[in-house]
Amino acid sequence: MPKEVLATKHPDDELIRADRIPHIWCPGCGIGIVMKCYVEAIKRSGIPPERHVVVSGIGCSSRLPGYMNIDSYHTTHGRAIPFAVGMNIVKPDLEITVIAGDGDLVTIGGNHFIHAIRRNHNFNVVLVNNFTYGMTGGQYGATTPIGSKMSTAPYGMIEYSFNLPLLVASLGAPFVARWTTLHIRQLTDAILKAMKVNGFAFIEVVSPCPTQYGEDNNFPTGMDMMKYFREACVVEHEADLRKVDIDLRPGKPLIVGNFVHIEKPSYNDMDRKLIEIAMKGRKPYG
Amino acid sequence: MTDGLIPPGKYFMQGNIACAEAALIAGCRFFAGYPITPSNEIAQWMSYRLPQVGGHFIQMEDEIASIMAIIGASNAGVKSMTATSGPGFSLMQENIGFGMMIETPCVIVNVQRGGPSTGIPTLVGQGDMMQARWGSHGDYEAIAYVPNSVQEFFDLTIKAFNAAEEYRQPVIVLADQTIGHMYGPLVVPPHEEIKIVNRKLPNVPPGVPDFKPFDAKYEVAPMALAGMGYRIHVTGLTHDEKGYPYYTHEVSTWCVKHLVSKIRNNAEKIWEVERFTLDDADIVVITYGITSRPAYQAVKVARSEGIKAGMLRLITVWPFPEEVVRKVSEQAKVILVPEINMGQMIHPIREVAECLVIGLSWAPGAVQTPDVILDAIRSVSR
């Protein structure tokens, strides 16, 4: 018996490449939620979709641009940020959002990450932190909590992990936030705020990866991680960032919030001034 | 007024500076680089000159970032360049391949120094000839030009931008420390006489259904830029005409063949060589770059001694001008290949030559003297 067709169009069709669905993400993965929040933020931004650009690197999260019906660039592993740097400098009116994972942005791409923040380039970075390399099979990375059992840490992770909000704030970013995939309204609002920030705006989104992280680390389904978010998350916008390390053990809080929101000149502002000065005193060839 | 560009006229200029001025004339308005000897003067001069013509300069955190920044800028429609030397060129390789895959015009200048590894930063080398061709993984066809004078460094930099725009891919200028640091005469022609190529943009308005950013009906598809409204998807994954990733042998066949064919089908247009007393030559020296200068002197002296020597200088090394070399080899008895490396361009020469090919390898750190090449010519003439 043919199924009744209830709708032929999804309200987000304008911004999603329906011809690319089904997507590659596993059941219980949080990346689709991040994508939905990004779509909502674009809609509410007042900036036409033609001016939005999404840039990613390599990994599960970095597949997000492939499903977005805007100009979308899926670059190489760890190099989304320098690609965005070049694009932003020559076309500052583009609203560029880099969306990629923890392995991509702060492990292999760590050097680009810190320098882009230091220079205060004017784009948004949404880092989907699922504590692992999902696509390649659950290896450990720079955000994997100590003690986690990983495919390349079968005896447990022995390294310390990044405290990303503290790192990013220490480099002077004008906007720093952390939310989880449970906080869809707060995350959407944060992405929207990020789009209005003049300079580097950073949002860490803690996200479940039941397949490659959760299974061996007490979060076997997406729902388990979401329940953990509900129980452990404490919204604390004024948090002391030295104390927001992620510790997934029972009884430890997961601090979320919009931690930093300040104003400072962006790289574009400085670059524009430099060019004005250079063109005014133009030498040697007039 | 020349809009801040170097006016036509005669100059006495350093090679690296001539390269930078040429880039500005070619329309380069974005430079991203990382300090490395012996290419530094290019970045330094660009940092001073680019803002004067309304362009942007940035010193990135490394060469990986530099190549990615120019690929990003080019995808927003601005002609872009980076300059480096061997170690930096090695770091760029992965993303040169990315530029090839997503068909992004940009120019990479490699002022070669002695290698391997850190090698001799301040002295000459030609050790990156094969890296320019095979450095990134997977199949693509490189375009690389090799200058042998300040004037040619200027001319070939403009040509590199033109080829990048015409074929929509990264193009390499393989200079070397001696050419980069050499001061020499430069003639800047009237600007209107300089050929400048700009990439083709889509000729359909944004919003047409089923727009294909890599449309197979073109040998080189017009380039849709970020912000134009075409809402394109661009990926380093094997992709179809729409830019969408597909893991099938069928799509891979189209994608990879497209990348190599656009260059292979036009190779003869890209080939450039210089011939010197080749007509009746039975001993032919095939050279490129700085090595052609002592070779030229050696061939001249050999001729004065009655030896039928000639020189073929490769200006385009990639795509390799195989038909030109093959023809030259038909009448030659011996081909000599002096290089400042342990034997690199000798391999494609041997692949096509129909005569004996002898390599004159020479370690980096100095240019061969004419005597070195002359002695070899004399010994094979006996």
Image (tube, coloured by chain):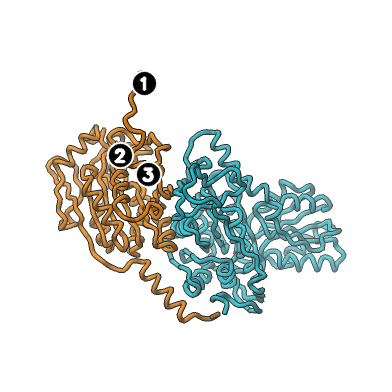
* Along the line of sight, the residue nearer the viewer: A109 or B281: A109
Nearer-N-terminus badge (1/3): 1
Nearer-N-terminus badge (1/2): 1
Q: Where does the image place residue B330, in percent across and percent down from the top left?
A: 82, 50
Please name the residue that numbered disc 3 is placed on. A14
Do the residues at pointers 1 and 2 share their chain? yes
Mark 3 vs mark 2, foreground winner is 3
For residue A200, above or below residue A283:
above
* Whether label 1 touches label 3, CB < 8 Å: no
Q: Is residue B154 left or right of residue B67?
A: right
Query: Alpha-carbon neighbours of circle 3 within 10 Å: few (<14), some, or many (≥20)?
Result: some
Mark 1 vs mark 2, foreground winner is 1
Q: CA distance from mark 1 to mark 3?
A: 27 Å
Q: Where does the image place residue A41, in percent across and percent down from the top left?
A: 29, 50
State the hue of chain A.
orange
The answer to whether residue B316 is seen in the rendering is yes
Residue in the picture at 37% in, 66% down: A268
Number of dots carrying numbers: 3
**Dot 3 amino acid type:** Glu
Tell me which corner region of the image, top left, top right, bottom left or bottom right, holds residue B255: top right
Q: CA distance from mark 3 to mark 2?
A: 43 Å
Quadrant where the image shows the N terminus of chain A: top left
Please name the residue that numbered disc 1 is placed on. A2
Q: Is residue A41 left or right of residue B377?
A: left
**Dot 2 amino acid type:** Ala
Q: In the current view of this chain or complex, which residue is farthest to the top?
A: A1
